[in-house]
Structure formats: C-alpha cells, structure tokens
Image (cartoon, rainbow, N blue to C red):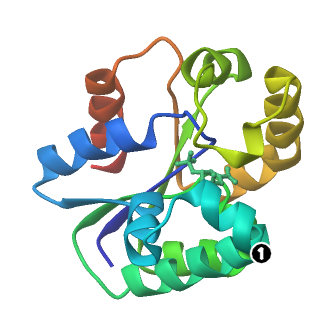
Amino acid sequence: MTNIYLIGFMGAGKTSVGRELADRLGYEFIDMDVMIEDQQQCTISEIFANHGEPHFRKLETELVKYLATKNNLVIGTGGGAILNQDNVDTMKGSGSTILLSVKPETILKRLKGDTTRPLLMVDDKLGKINSILDSRKEKYRASAEVIVQTDDKNVFQIVDEILTKIS
Ligand code: S3P
C-alpha cells in the first residue's frame, strides 16, 4: 500500500518529477507509457494507430492492476489513466494519488514540437489541450489525494512540496 501514483495531464512533468521523487524516497520509478511500449514492442502512437485508443486503455488498466500488487514504486501514470474509475480505485487502494496540476499554456510550451502524444497531433494544439483538460478537470481533482500546482516551479521545488504534503 505504499506506491505513489503521479496523475495529471500530458506534459505535467510526471516523468521528471517522478524520477526525482523516487530518488529521494529510495523507491523505484515506473513510467507506465514506457512500460507499455516495452511490453508491446511498439510506441504508444503505433498502438493508437494500429489497435485504437480502447485497446490502449485496456493495456493501461491491466498495468495499473499489476503495479498495484507491488510496493515502493513511484508511478508516472498516463494522462488518461484516471478516465477509468476502476484504475482510480486500484490506485487509491494501493497507494497515494498526487495530481500535478498545470495550465494549458504551460502544456503547450512543453509539448510544442512533441510528436509522441497521438491525442495532440492536431493543428490547433492549444484548442485541443483546452478541450481535453476541460473534460477531465473534475476527474483529475476527484482522483487526487494531494494536488500540487506545477507552473513556474522546478522539479526540486515540486518534489519538496510533495514530500511536505505526504509526510
Ligand atoms: C494520454 C497521455 C499519454 C499517453 C497517451 C494518452 C492521455 O501519457 O498515455 O498518449 O490520454 O492523456 P503522458 O501523460 O505520460 O503523456
């Protein structure tokens, strides 16, 4: 029951914060997307393109269930992992959920040239970020036991804040 699940939108910093947080706690860091790519031997974009988003969501749910059987992990979840309430229940039942909250403009700045997020491969990236964020905002908040605002903070400040809030 000691895992830490970092939740939040694409570009919220779950991977960079997760690595540092895991270091500080002496935990192992797991990036869910990377683990899915390793298991499937292809990229997230290829999974979306060849098998569709529902298939990706199934893989995501299976992975959450598996990780919940482990201990002392900091887990960078995929931005959409909280869309399935079963995933949220599994996370909360096996650790703490921490939301890295981030403004749309910051997300755009961070993901401007990114080509690895299939949901953001559109011309109007900011419009798409806003619409997905709007549709998920409540879900992110409801899924989080701790919320950390990350705009204008570096990784070390964010990790310090998380450690203070969970201690
Ligand atoms: C997604 C977020 C991505 C990845 C996939 C879908 C989402 O993960 O799981 O592209 O639905 O928000 P990151 O949040 O790590 O970018």
Residue 62 vertical position relative to residue 102 in the rendered view, above or below: below
Label 1 sits on residue: 54
Quadrant in the rendering for residue 48: bottom right
Could one spot residue 58 in this view of the protein?
A: yes
Image quarter for residue 82?
bottom right
User: Residue 41: x percent and y percent?
Assistant: 43, 71
x and y, in percent, of residue 67 in the image: 38, 79
Residue under the image location 58 percent in, 79 percent down: 59
Instruction: Tell me where residue 124 sits by quadrant.
Output: top right
Q: Quadrant of the N terminus?
A: bottom left
Neighbor class of circle 1 (other Cα within 10 Å; few <14, some 14-19, many 20+) is few
For residue 150, above or below residue 47: above
Residue 73 percent location from the top left of the image: 27, 66
> In the structure shown, which secondary structural element does the residue marked by tag 1 occupy?
helix
Residue drawn at x 74%, y 37% as measured from the top left: 120
Residue 34, position in %: x, y?
Answer: 40, 59
Q: Residue at x 69, y 51 (%)?
A: 140
Which of these two is toward me, 154 or 142? 154
Ligand 1 within 8 angstroms of badge 1 C-beta: no
Determine whether, in the image, residue 10 is placed left or right of residue 118.
left
Residue closer to the observer: 148 or 118? 118
> Left or right of 55: which side holds 44?
left
Q: Identify which amino acid the numbered label 1 is placed on.
A: Pro
